[in-house]
Amino acid sequence: MNGTNLFKIALRALANNKLRAFLTMLGIIIGVASVITMLAIGQGSKRSIQQQISEMGSNMIMIYPGGERRGGVRLDPSAMQTLKLTDVESLRDETRFVAGVSPYVSSSGQFINGANNYPGSMTGVSVEYLNIRQLNVDDGEMFTEEDIQASAKVCVVGQTIVDNLFPDGGDPIGTVIRFNKIPFRIIGVLKAKGYNSMGQDQDAVVLAPYTTIMKRLLAVTYLQSIYSSALTEELTEEAVDEMTAILRQNHKPKDTDADDFTIRSQQELSETLSSTTDMMTTLLACIAGISLVVGGIGIMNIMYVSVTERTREIGLRMSVGARGIDILSQFLIEAIMISITGGLIGVILGIGASVAVNSLLNWPIFVQTWSVIISFIVCTFTGVFFGWYPARKAADLDPIEAIRYE
């Protein structure tokens, strides 16, 4: 019996029991759709995180004071005084893999403009901070090196600050606002960036010369942290090793002492978040994949029923010359057709559900081709695996006993 006849027989058998065939497919449909949707959500979240980290500066490196203990107690990093301006100068002059370095100090308080006020932090940085954080001035200008040298009371503000201090839509450029009773003149407005993946408002920022913050607000000579960027993302590890060596040389710790600073890179953060996202995506896909197993069990169950119902038919076919391989192929084709048809419907439903999640919930989604292919291959394998045993049972029936079966 050729393959075409076997295919027609299998198709006729399924057509005679449409509802039963569809209910059998349902487990496969739900399984494939769930796997594709879960993977799309997971991959979409991963790409969204990576994109937002890239917008913050994928080659950014942060240096914090840390590793110091006094009386067995670890101090708050913001209170440690291990990072100095001399460290910044050394990093600028002696590194080969670093594109920019900026001091970083911050003071919390209240911004006031007339009757409007907004709580926030004034951040002291250098001009290079814009390139390190990939920020752009949308209106006005950035403060200059001359402003830094003069500890000028000027600042560049984010869009959130503008919206809250100038609700009437007035032009903020040139306006003097007050922060902790000290006047600052706004000379620029940063381009809006929105919220990042951790829910932080990237536009609630005010930048000023670091010397101004250190002298006029904090009255300190140490830095709370240092921001820098590697020449490229691929050179991040080399830049970190180089900066570690320079800072250890500056701070001269004993051989047995731990570093009194901590270096973190965006690459490290990206890898950590990606690893966590991949693990969660795999977990969700495995949970969704359980329904594929349930669907496979449903196929096995219905094929057992089919073999039982058609025992006399099997006996008649074998008595007129059908071989065991023909009977095996017939029932196996039925199982595969159920799983493949269910897989195709599941793929369409999974892609549709992913689009619906994106449209209705505004969750980032990304349907990868390999997830569709793997889901389809798995559902086909499921049909073969769970359909084989009932088909084998049908092929092993004794023709005479099968014909006598009531």
Image: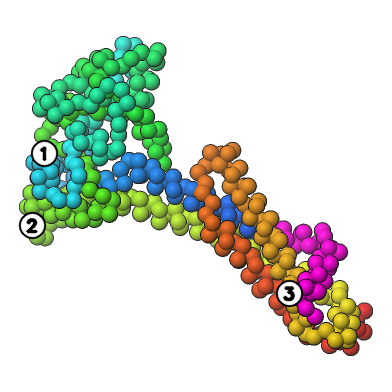
Q: Is residue 104 magenta?
A: no
Asked where in the image residue 256 lies, by quadrant, the reply is bottom left
Question: At 75% from the left edge and 79% from the top edge, which residue is drawn?
Answer: 328
- Of the numbered discs 2 and 3, the one sitting upstream in the chain is 2
Residue 293's place in the image compared with 158, above or below, is below
Bin the neighbour count of mark 3 within 10 Å (Cα to Cα): few under 14, some 14-19, many 20 and up: many
Residue drawn at x 84%, y 67% as measured from the top left: 12
In-front residue for pair 323/203:
323
Q: Can residue 136 be spotted in the picture?
A: yes
Residue drawn at 47 percent across, 47 percent down: 45
Q: Residue 406, percent across and down? A: 92, 79
Q: Residue at x 37, y 25 (%)?
A: 160
Label 3: element kind: helix
Quick one: 381 or 66, which is closer to the camera?
Answer: 381
Distance, label 2 to label 1, CA atoms, is 22 Å
Label 3 and label 1: CA atoms lie apart by 75 Å
Classify residue 285 as left or right of residue 164: right
* Magenta stretch holds residue 19: yes
Q: Relative to 67, does residue 220 appear above or below in the rendering?
A: above
Instruction: Give the residue type at disc 3.
Output: Leu
Residues rendered magenta in the picture: 1-29
Specify whether 282 is left or right of 91.
right
Instruction: Report the front residue among 190 and 260.
Output: 190
| Residue hosting label 2 | 254
Q: Which amino acid does the dot numbered 2 rest on?
A: Lys
What is the secondary structure assignment of the residue under circle 2?
loop
- Asked if one can make out residue 251 in the rendered structure from this viewpoint, the answer is no
* Residue 317 spot, x, y in % from top left: 87, 81
- The residue indicated by pointer 3 is 332
Mark 2 residue crowding within 10 angstroms, few (<14) / some (14–19) / many (20+) = few
Instruction: Kindly indicate the quadrant of the structure image that contains residue 80.
Output: top left
